Image (spheres, grey):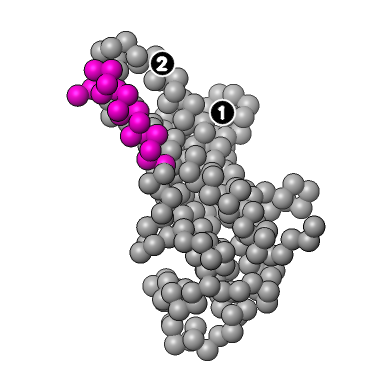
């Protein structure tokens, strides 16, 4: 079966990045619910159980973020944002732009002159998009600490400073997720014809909150929190 560039983009987003974003957002929201009710859980002797769950949630978040930003590899092509952007660059003449006017306005908000964008062909505009999205990817230095935690703690259980894990987690992960959702919003809305972003909001974020809402209902029904 021959896959078109759009098919490849769709596979990366729908079968890879979209799921990894959901997994990371879901894990972070669950982690926060547990942390916000730590005293009540401790009082009811559930601190060990939920402490283990938090550790697992941290692992899942770090692994998901790393998968989202994995660099392309010819031997084992990842379903990642750098791989998706590479498809945009390599296939700018074949990919059709959906909702071009909205894309121009988005790029204008990112600092591009819309008058200049109006004169470009779709393939030229796609090249501009690919370059703009590439600049939103984290640098090697920005992603290095997250990968170090994955490699030394999550994958191989090497010794690593616990305080460093915490500072990495909350300083970087939210920002990396915001970037990922913006990139998926552009690719999904304008090259796949699926609305991943509406009025600047990533529409699938509500799905990630469902499990944390369920946990809150459980804690309330159990009488652990009011």
Q: Which mark, residue 49?
A: 2
Exactly how many numbered labels are in the figure? 2
The structure residue drawn at horizontal position 49% and vertical position 74%, both measured from the top left corner, is 99
The image position of residue 150, as x and y in percent, is 57, 35
Using the numbered discs, state the Cα–Cα distance from disc 2 to disc 1 in whole angstroms: 20 Å
The image position of residue 189, as x and y in percent, is 50, 65
- Tag 2 secondary structure: helix
Q: What's the magenta region?
A: 208-226
| Relative depth, front residue between 107 and 97 | 97
Q: Nearer the viewer, mark 2 or mark 1?
A: 2
Q: Is residue 210 magenta?
A: yes
Vertical arrangement, residue 92 with respect to residue 151, above or below: below
The structure residue drawn at horizontal position 63% and vertical position 59%, both measured from the top left corner, is 9
Name the image quarter holding the N terminus.
bottom right
The structure residue drawn at horizontal position 52% and vertical position 68%, both measured from the top left corner, is 190
The structure residue drawn at horizontal position 47% and vertical position 31%, both measured from the top left corner, is 58
Residue 130 visible in image: yes
Q: Tell me which corner region of the image, top left, top right, bottom left or bottom right, holds residue 211.
A: top left
Q: Is residue 211 magenta?
A: yes
| Relative depth, front residue between 162 and 95 | 95
Crowd rating for badge 1 (residues with CA inside 10 Å; few <14, some 14–19, many 20+): some
Label 1, on which residue?
153
């Amino acid at each position: 079966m021959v896959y078109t560039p759009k098919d490849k983009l769709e596979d990366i987003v729908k079968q890879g990045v979209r799921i990894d974003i959901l997994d990371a957002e879901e894990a972070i929201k669950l982690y926060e619910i547990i942390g916000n009710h730590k005293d009540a859980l401790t009082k009811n002797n559930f601190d060990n159980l939920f402490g283990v769950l938090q550790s697992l949630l941290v692992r899942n978040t770090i692994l998901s973020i790393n998968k989202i930003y994995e660099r392309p590899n010819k031997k084992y092509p990842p379903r990642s944002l750098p791989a998706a952007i590479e498809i945009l660059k390599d296939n700018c003449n074949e990919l059709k732009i959906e909702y071009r006017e909205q894309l121009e306005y988005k790029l204008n908000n990112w600092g591009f002159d819309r008058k200049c964008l109006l004169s470009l062909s779709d393939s030229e505009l796609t090249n501009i998009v690919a370059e703009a999205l590439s600049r939103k990817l984290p640098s090697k230095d920005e992603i290095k600490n997250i990968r170090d935690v994955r490699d030394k703690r999550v994958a191989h259980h090497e010794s690593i400073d616990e305080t460093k894990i915490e500072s990495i987690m909350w300083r970087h992960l939210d920002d990396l997720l915001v970037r990922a959702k913006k990139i998926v919003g552009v690719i999904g809305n304008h090259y796949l014809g699926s609305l991943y972003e509406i009025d600047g909001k990533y529409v699938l974020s509500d799905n990630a909150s469902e499990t944390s809402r369920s946990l809150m209902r459980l804690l309330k029904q159990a009488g652990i929190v009011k």
